[in-house]
Image (cartoon, grey):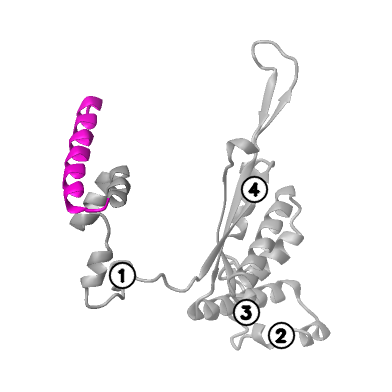
């Protein structure tokens, strides 16, 4: 709408509102107050500027529930973002591939002995994510699984510029910072049985390779003892479990 059209419509509406409201009022004080905001009082007189009249005429003032958007289900996974990471994202992604799909307890024990610099960053992110899921969201720390671990590009404000005098416009070196996102979720009951079976199978395979003594076998937990002990005499372990 052009400016002169808008001004013309506003002036006509103001003039029409003044003429209608001045005739309806009797006292000069009321006329002076109405002339200050003529269009507002005119719309109030018609009952189209507010929803109070609609609520007063309705039988119930209680709003109806929103049936289009149902309430979200209970939170089963938690995402934690570690910002300001200065290491190479490719090296951190290699460690991320190692920990995806593992239990948090096994991941922390595995990263504590991993001889990689990126393992310290991943350990810090997963440890903070477990604390966030436990204290803020009330999840069980013993039943958490690393559902995802990915590193992405950080914000522009996190990049640092380093000045090194050089020709051809290469004097300013930008060292960007990245952010590491870790997603933890609870383990389903059927997944717990599968994880326990894989741990028992892998321990049986390793015990045959290591040839443990009788004294060392006494300290083995009962959860890791299988009835079919001769199953993996010549085979490979069934799956990854730490």
User: For mark 3, what is the residue?
Assistant: 200
Q: CA distance from mark 4 to mark 3?
A: 38 Å
- Looking at the rendered image, the disc whose residue lies closer to the viewer, 4 or 1, is 1
The boundaries of the magenta stretch are 1-27
Q: Residue at x 54, y 72 (%)?
A: 186
Q: Is 18 left or right of 121, judged from the image as shown? A: left
The earlier-in-sequence mark between 2 and 1 is 1
Labelled pair 3, 1 in contact (Cβ < 8 Å): no
How far from the left and from the top, in percent, is residue 229?
Answer: 62, 84
Local crowd size for mark 2, using a 10 Å CA cut-off: few (<14), some (14–19), many (≥20): few
The earlier-in-sequence mark between 4 and 2 is 4
Q: CA distance from mark 4 to mark 1?
A: 37 Å
User: For mark 2, what is the residue?
Assistant: 221
Local crowd size for mark 1, using a 10 Å CA cut-off: few (<14), some (14–19), many (≥20): few
Farthest residue, direction right: 215
Figure label count: 4
């Amino acid at each position: 709408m052009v400016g002169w059209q808008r001004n013309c419509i506003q002036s006509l509406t103001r003039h029409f509102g003044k003429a209608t409201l001045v005739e309806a009022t009797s006292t000069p004080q009321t006329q002076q107050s109405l002339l200050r905001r003529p269009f507002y009082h005119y719309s109030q007189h018609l009952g189209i500027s507010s929803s109070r009249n609609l609520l007063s005429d309705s039988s119930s003032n209680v709003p109806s529930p929103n049936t289009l958007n149902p309430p979200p289900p209970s939170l089963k996974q938690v995402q934690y973002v570690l910002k300001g990471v200065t290491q190479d994202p490719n090296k951190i992604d290699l460690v991320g591939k190692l920990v995806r799909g593992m239990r948090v307890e096994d991941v922390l024990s595995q990263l504590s002995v991993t001889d990689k610099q990126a393992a310290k960053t991943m350990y810090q992110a997963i440890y903070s994510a477990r604390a966030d899921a436990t204290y803020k969201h009330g999840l069980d720390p013993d039943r958490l699984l690393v559902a995802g671990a990915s590193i992405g590009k950080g914000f522009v404000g996190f990049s640092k510029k380093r000045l090194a005098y050089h020709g051809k416009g290469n004097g300013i070196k930008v060292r960007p910072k990245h952010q590491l996102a870790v997603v933890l979720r609870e383990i389903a009951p059927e997944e717990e049985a599968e994880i326990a079976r894989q741990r028992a199978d892998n321990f049986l395979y390793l015990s045959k390779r290591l040839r443990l003594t009788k004294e060392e076998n006494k300290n083995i937990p009962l959860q890791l003892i299988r009835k079919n002990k001769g199953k993996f005499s010549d085979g490979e372990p069934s799956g990854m479990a730490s």
